[in-house]
Image (cartoon, rainbow, N blue to C red):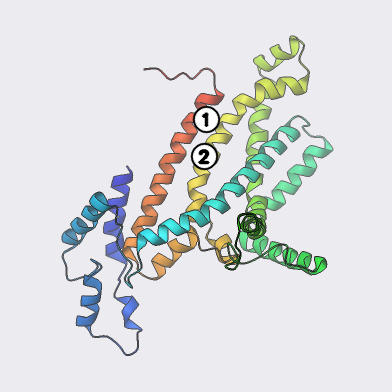
Amino acid sequence: MIVVATNLTYFLANAFLDPRANYLSLRPPRSPEQIERSLAQYNLAPSTPLLERWWHWITAIVTHWDWGYSPVGQSVNGQIAFRIGVSAQLVLFAVIFSTVIGISLGVYTASRQYRFADRFHQGLSIITLNIPMPVAGLAVVLLAIAANRALGDNVLFVAGAQSPSITGFWPLILDRIQHLAAPTIALTVTGYAGYHFLQRSLLLDNINSDYVRTARAKGLTRQEAIRRHGLRTSLIPVVTSIAFTIPALFTGAVLTETIFAWQGMGQYFITTISKNDVNGAVAVAAFGAAMTAVGAILADLAVVALDPRVRVTN
């Protein structure tokens, strides 16, 4: 499916994107012949038959893992390799914090159904769930600036993934944390509520099930029965949802990366479209398809780990 999706995207990108647009605004203007020669060296010349271009493209990938160049000569391999690392930092911590907070609140509120704590956290999650990312991002930026002013130092950075002048292992780690804090907070605030509501709803369905009542009849307290028996079953759909969220965050955190000036995969995806970068757009689509496959595998592994009824047989 990854191969099919990637090749289909290549033909669609060639149908809708025009790499010649990158040269039309140059001054002095270039002639059609000059544009054609410039694009030909990157296997993007419109005069070359599409199937011939596709064959050169797919051959380069299979034999050299070379995903080609942009219309202005940037290596797609270099761009993808750099931006995957940038996005991975953001996605990893945001997913971890959103998952931990969401599942913990789901368990906490489900075990206190209709009490004050349940209604308070549900109301708070409804508010955060409906906050648009631009609003959350800008609010975090303003709070970070205010905190820096109050402390008299730049403790939280609101732009970029790292400072170019930092050297040394521990100073670099600290600098990365300072840059990661603000965008991670923004993604966590807008992302945890979905896991909270899903976990709460599923756990409530299992609290009154026969096996939970049996566990309580054997001497377990209500909280122990929920944690040991009800939670494990209700976690399966939540973990599956999280596994499929990861690939979407890699290429979908466009607004977050734009607000905080992170040069990640989401911003690169928008850049490839705006710059009519056929090879770059196809590479992003292939990466998204691969991450979706990884998400599916992680979801299956999570089901096997959480559900004792599932067994892998030869």
Q: Furthest residue to the bottom?
A: 28
Residue 277, x across and y down, in percent = 35, 66
Q: Is residue 82 left or right of residue 75?
A: right
Location of the C terminus by quadrant is: top left
Amino acid type of the residue that numbered disc 1 sits on in the rendered structure: Ala
- Element under disc 1: helix
Is 53 placed above or below 114 here? below
- x and y percent of residue 261 in the render? 57, 66
- Give the structural element (helix, strand or loop) at label 2: helix
Looking at the picture, does residue 113 appear above or below residue 98? Answer: above
| 3, 81: nearer the viewer | 81
Residue on which disc 1 sits: 302
Location of residue 225 in the rendering, given as x and y in whole percent from the top left corner: 72, 19
Q: Number of callouts in the render?
A: 2
Q: Quadrant of the N terminus?
A: top left
Q: Give left or right: position of 282 versus 90.
A: left
Check disc 2: other Cα within 10 Å, few if <14, some if 14-19, many if 20+.
many
Q: Residue at x 23, y 70 (%)?
A: 41
Using the image, tell me which numbered label, if any, was put on residue 241: none
- x%, y% of residue 199? 64, 35
- Tell me the distance, in whole angstroms, between the alpha carbons under discs 2 and 1: 9 Å
Q: Residues within 10 Å of mark 1 (few under 14, many from 20)?
A: some
Which numbered dot is residue 243?
A: 2
119 relative to 27 in the view: left or right = right
**Label 2–label 1 contact, CB within 8 A:** yes
Foreground residue, 314 or 217?
314
Outermost residue on the top side: it is 218
Front-most of 170 and 87? 170
> In this picture, is 45 found above or below 237?
below
The amino acid marked with disc number 2 is Ala
